[in-house]
Amino acid sequence: MKRILTIIGARPQIIKSAAISRAIRTAFPDQLKEDILHTGQHYDEKMSAVFFDELQIPQPDFNLNVGSGSHGAQTAKMLEGIEEVLLNGNYDGLLVYGDTNSTLAGAIAAVKLHIPVIHVEAGLRSFNKAMPEEVNRITCDHASSLLFSPTTTGVDNLLNEGFKTDNPAPYHADNPGVFHCGDVMYDNSRFFGELADEKVDAKWHSLKDEAFILATIHRPYNTDDTDRLLAIFDDLRWLCDDTQMKLVLPLHPRTKNILQAKRPEQFQAFADHPKVELIEPVSFLEMTFLEKHSRLIVTDSGGVQKEAYFFQKPSVVIRTETEWVELIAHGSARLSFETGEAMRQAFRAALETELNDFPPYFGDGKASEFICQTILDSLK
């Protein structure tokens, strides 16, 4: 039996891990043993612990409880804690997701101990190293033994960086294996899409009968600049007036507190708009429900723009670039960073675009099974 240590720490990683853990539990229970280490990078109850019960994920075997902090301090604490677990265990591989500090710490700790790193969501690039996530994902890829890319674009990015797709097994850091596997989040969306309608609180079900806009804004370049964030809010308020649709916006308490302290009158005017519904961060099933039944999604999240595609919704992405270039080429997603008329035009265009065909850019919903089988076949 192969034994792997899975590193999670941020909300998206917890969600992604549900797909792999489910595959191990249902298809590979006698072949793969998974231990889970939670770094504690996200420690808010609504954004972390509750996900384990909701997504049917085993409780972590280890929790470092590192909390927030500067990139260096946070990553150092994670690195120390992960290394200790690896030294006291007997693991055939270490699995990481995405591009957070937890991902980086796990990859560095494992590769220096000559334990194969398994990177799910390999090859994604924004080509903007001002983003900490870009540095994390590049570093992790070049320390990995197994690289699983959700898209052909991700594989092409790795090829452009010198990786090969024809290396023979067994794989290690100097002879990595690159695989196009599809997206584990598509696996999850298929599995949890129907479950969300059954499980979410009845208070959300009235939204099914009306057209509404779902917005999520969390990236520092949108939230830390108060003037910019309020300008985005002005554009969203305009969108409500222009379409007469309700806007549902989960707003992190930290962002809300900053706005109430720095711009109380402007923030209150936005919050009091009859078509604006500000809510606290929602669970994964609640978010799935909102995405599934929305008319338009406005976001700066990499995961949410992709989930919009899974549920065949148009989206406006408040960023200058995206790792998911397929969505832009397809026309279901539009990049819009400048506030004012440019963003409002993007909103209009997104609502007016007819979307009929959604190619299977993200696989067949069985990426998790492919990843598990490849781990079994490819590692010593």
Image: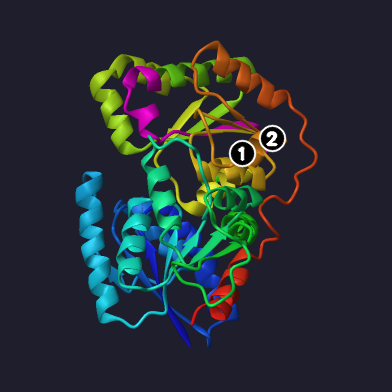
Indicate whether 258 appears above or below 144.
Answer: above
Secondary structure at numbered mark 1: helix
Q: Would you say 173 lies left or right of 376 here?
A: left
**Tag 2: amino acid:** Ala
Density class for disc 1 (Cα within 10 Å; few <14, some 14-19, many ≥20) is: some
The residue depicted at 42 percent of the width and 19 percent of the height is 270
The residue depicted at 68 percent of the width and 21 percent of the height is 349
The numbered dot on residue 329 is 2
Q: Nearer the viewer, residue 246 or 233?
A: 233
In the picture as drawn, the residue positioned furthest to the right comes out as 356
**Is 242 within the magenta?**
no
Q: Position of residue 56 (x, y in %)?
A: 48, 68
- The magenta segment is 206-229
Quadrant in the rendering for residue 61: bottom left
**Is 216 within the magenta?**
yes
Indicate whether 296 appears above or below 232.
Answer: below
Cα separation, mark 1 vs mark 2, equals: 6 Å
- Residue tagged 1: 325
Q: Position of residue 8 (x, y in %)?
A: 38, 61
In the picture as drawn, the residue positioned furthest to the top comes out as 341
* Marks 1 and 2 in Cβ contact (< 8 Å): yes
Q: Position of residue 57 (x, y in %)?
A: 45, 68
Secondary structure at numbered mark 2: helix
**Tag 1: amino acid:** Val
Q: Nearer the viewer, residue 190 or 30?
A: 30
Q: Nearer the viewer, residue 361 or 178?
A: 178
Indicate whether 302 appears above or below 236.
Answer: below
Quadrant in the rendering for residue 164: bottom right
Q: Would you say 95 lies left or right of 177 here?
A: left
Indicate whether 157 appears above or below 257.
Answer: below
The numbered dot on residue 227 is none
Q: Position of residue 5 (x, y in %)?
A: 39, 73
